[in-house]
Image (tube, helix red, strand yellow):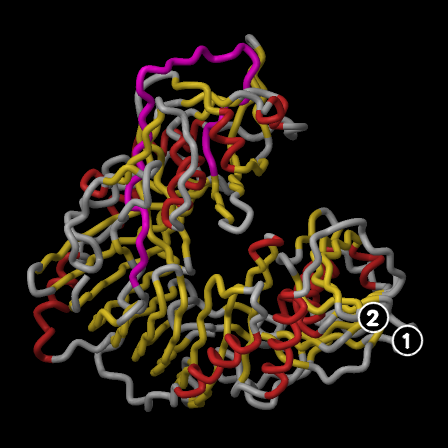
Amino acid sequence: MNGRYIKQGRSVRLEVTRAGRSRLEVSEHGEATEDGRTFVARSAAPASGVRKPAASVLASIETQLLAALPPTVSIERMTAVTGTAKHRFAPSGLPEREWSESHIRLHASLVHRERAARVLVDLGGARWTEQHSAWLARVAAALGQLDGGGPLRSWKVLRLGSSIAAALWPELLVALLEHPGAGSRLALSQRRHDVFRLDGFGDPIAEVPLSGAGVVSPAHWPNFFRPTYRVRPVRAAFHLGATLPPSNERPDADAVALLAPIRVHRSVVNLELLATDRNVSFALPVVIGVERLASSLFAGAQKEMWFPYAAGSWGGAVLLAP
Amino acid sequence: VHDHLFASATRDETWTLARGGITLLEEKYERGLARTHVARGGFEIEASDHFGAKEKDIADALDRSLAEPMDEMVAECDEGVPLRIRSIRESRYLRSDSVEKLSTTSALTITTAANRSVITTPQLLHQHLQLLLSLADAEEEVTDYRAVPMEWSNGTAAVLLHEAIGHPAQHGAGGTWPQWLSAADEPGSNPFGEMSVDDCGIPAQSVELNGARPLLPWRRTSYRDAPLRRMSNLVIRAHGVSALPPARRLIVRLVAGGHYDPLTDRVSLVVSSSEMVDGASRRVLAPFTVHESRSAIAEALLGSLGSPMVYPGVACFDEGQRVFAGSSAPPLITRAFGDS
């Protein structure tokens, strides 16, 4: 969509890296224009008129994270950021629209060095909630209890935790778009978010079916993702979610997090899972075809949680029963 | 490291070259400054893209340093084949109690329709463009790269060792490397632009990387980032150990990206163009990924075939920050990794 976009934003960032612990306050005011051919973005001259966000939440998140770590687990890196932004977009020939938003994110890499295991943490939302704290505590504890290996556990039914489900949807969406016949039971859709309601042009993010009956093809997805004024907005599916059939099966183990990013190669999905069974955790690799995976997922009982994967993804517990 | 003022400007343009001519797809310009306070165990940074009246001279100097248009240089890449060219020019200003310095770097990424790419400088543009255009399309898949010796040509060994020696050095990990091999970070001869002081105002010096914990220069992508000790220009030299190329070997021509995992001490490197040579027979191979431990790479190094050459550069990512790093190395021979 041609027009002029202006963003004023302020953020506070707490970073833990191998260089130490740094705190950054960033104020920016940028604008971007598109004329149908060239995308132009530049820093704008005036100072940002947005107020600095309250940064005390970052120290609180860091304290929670440190408190959740068992002695065997350490922080390899961490970025906690809170930001507020005011957006304006003037489409060519149409009235200008203006909107604001605030967000909090935690990106961290937690490692169990003795077991050479890593969990990537990507949490976010409009504010930090009990749900985030509980997820963090559960996953850190599971990583701390990771056993030293041994024979692979056999299982028939696995419960996949919310972050695994949320990470699966973008991968399965791509795979299902490439192979439309696969996994017709799995209904992926663009969902709503109570706070992140508008896209990169200020248009409402509505529910849109993305797989199965009544599917909307990517070329007609109605919303555009613009994570910063510096990049050209692209069509994207926001707040992905899945509708799954119910199941009464009892899981043999709980997979609480991923130990490596999901890999999909030639229609085969590779999951490196951190699983728990009572008070023991173990690494569980799962290699499964896209079609079989998509037709073996069932709804599990758990409140859904939003994750900042791509343009957002909703995950609740799901059962995998291939 | 002392408190300082750092400012940066980046002009980032993407062009396409096709039969219809040159098209500017994207043009981005951002600049800002970072008041950097050295705190216990890290930095406290106040960053803004707003330059006040006192800093107007800095903003003007940054703008002037990147004002030259790039369209003529892009047009020079017209060889009658479709290309995508991304030009990233960066200017950085540093002021501390002892230093005031403005420096500029320039990197060009050229990508073919087959999605092969090189990162180069205006000075080396034609040399690396010809290298890119000389690479043929793949004829067969690699069955097992670990079964054959490899010749790391065109300076690609520098990228292998960027991952196997350079990144571990950033994490303080040493290693046992052949006595004949030296690896040094030499900021003064960085092909992307000379670096006499680093991004915290410290004089940048050459350091050996395969020794005790080296003090690499502080670098940061922009005013919005915290400085990290990073490589600037990796130079690999082989002292007195020549190897003969085996009749059957895999010749690496171009690589696409690599990764070092400090948790597993393993290296991954995507080989985007290579050939399997067996006597007079040559077959171009599809891209594949080398996954090896650092110790396996050290044990496999046999010797060199000649003098160092500058590899098209590396866009190096660490802690989410991209910096361009120079790389040069002689052609090196590694024995079959499966023999280790």
Quadrant that contains the C terminus of chain A: bottom right
Q: Is residue A312 magenta?
A: no
Residue B268 in view (yes/no) = yes
Tell me: B201 left or right of B117.
Answer: left
- Give the Cα distance between marks 1 and 2: 8 Å
How many C-alpha atoms fall within 10 Å of the one at disc 1: few (<14), some, or many (≥20)?
some
Q: Which of the two discs, 1 and 2, labels the residue nearer the N terminus?
A: 1
Tell me: A57 left or right of B306.
Answer: right
The kind of residue tagged 1 is Ser
Q: Residue at the location (67% across, 77% down)?
A: A314
Identify whether B310 is placed above or below A104. above
Which residue is label 1 attached to?
Answer: A247
How many C-alpha atoms fall within 10 Å of the one at disc 2: few (<14), some, or many (≥20)?
many
Q: Residue at the location (37% across, 34% down)?
A: B79
CB atoms of marks 1 and 2 within 8 Å: yes
Q: What stretch of residues is rendered in magenta?
A: B227-255
The residue nearer to you, when weighing A58 against B278, is A58
The residue nearer to you, when weighing B272 against A166, is A166
Tell me: B184 left or right of A168.
Answer: left
Percent position of residue B53, x then y: 9, 79
Q: Is residue B241 magenta?
A: yes
Q: Residue at the location (70% across, 71% down)?
A: A216
Mark 2 lies on a secondary structure that is strand
Percent position of residue B317, x then y: 41, 53
Tell me: A136 left or right of A29.
Answer: right
Q: Residue at the location (31% across, 77% down)?
A: A26
Mark 1 lies on a secondary structure that is loop
Which residue is label 2 attached to?
Answer: A319
Label 1 marks which chain's residue? Answer: A
The kind of residue tagged 2 is Leu
Percent position of residue B59, x then y: 14, 69
Name which quarter of the figure residue B220 lies in: bottom left
